[in-house]
Amino acid sequence: YFVLFLHETFAASVVTAGALFVLVNIAAMVARIGWGLVSDRHFQGKRQPVLFIILALTVCSTLSAALLSSSSPLWVVGALSILFGISAFAWTGILGTLVIEIAGPESAGSAISLVQVLSTPATLLAPPLFGWLADVTGTYHASWLVLTIIGTVGLITVRWVREEEPA
């Protein structure tokens, strides 16, 4: 819904909105590698603090999307696109690594499979619910706020994760 959000809220042309979505994906591609490097080099292989940072940035991005006005300049929308890319679109590598490392070699396959089984329904149901909420309310504001709440729950939950010291 990001392209529709940009087109309907900011009157961005479909081409401009599509280009900003490309920017989201480029930022995500770079960030997935970058977050791994940050985790390895600046957090001594710890994944939980990096996942916490990513979730905090995700909450910032969804809340920002909810609060932006239709008169926001295009550069602000572009910055939001990059923020979405480095956060909401770039967390999977760190989460997968964290799950595998916590589970250990003997249970890594089962653990990552369980995460996939638990997260797949959310990835299938969230987009239609996001769109439905936008349709019912006539704005994307509530949809972004619901995602902000979900991200905040994730932010609180990830604080409970305990890692062993990396080898």
Image (cartoon, rainbow, N blue to C red):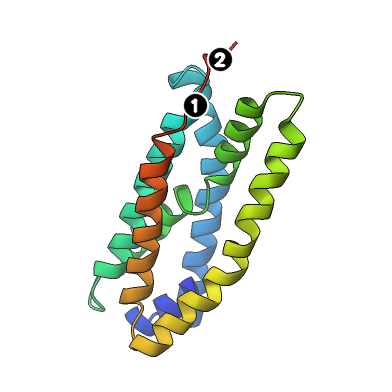
Query: Which numbered circle lies on residue 92?
Result: none
- Specify few, some or many for label 2: CA neighbours under 10 Å numbering under 14, 14-19, or 20 or more: few
The percent coordinates of residue 114 (x first, y second) are 68, 46
* Vertical arrangement, residue 166 with respect to residue 162, above or below: above
Judge by depth and name the residue closer to the eye, 119 or 59: 119
> Image check: 133 left or right of 115?
left
Q: Residue at x 22, y 77 (%)?
A: 71
Asked whether the residues under the numbered discs 2 and 1 touch, taking CB atoms below 8 Å apart as contact, a structural biologist would say no
State which quadrant residue 122 falls in. bottom right
State which quadrant residue 158 falls in. top left
> Image check: 133 left or right of 106?
left
Task: Residue type at mark 1: give it.
Answer: Ser
The percent coordinates of residue 56 (x first, y second) are 35, 45
> The residue tagged with tag 1: helix, strand or loop?
helix
Q: Which residue is mark 1?
A: 39
How far apart marks 2 and 1 lie (CA) works out to 11 Å
Q: Residue at x 43, y 56 (%)?
A: 84
Q: Residue at x 53, y 69 (%)?
A: 126
Q: Residue at x 46, y 75 (%)?
A: 130
Q: Quadrant of the C terminus?
A: top right
Q: Which residue is mark 2?
A: 166
Among the two numbered marks 2 and 1 on one chain, the one whose residue lies closer to the N terminus: 1
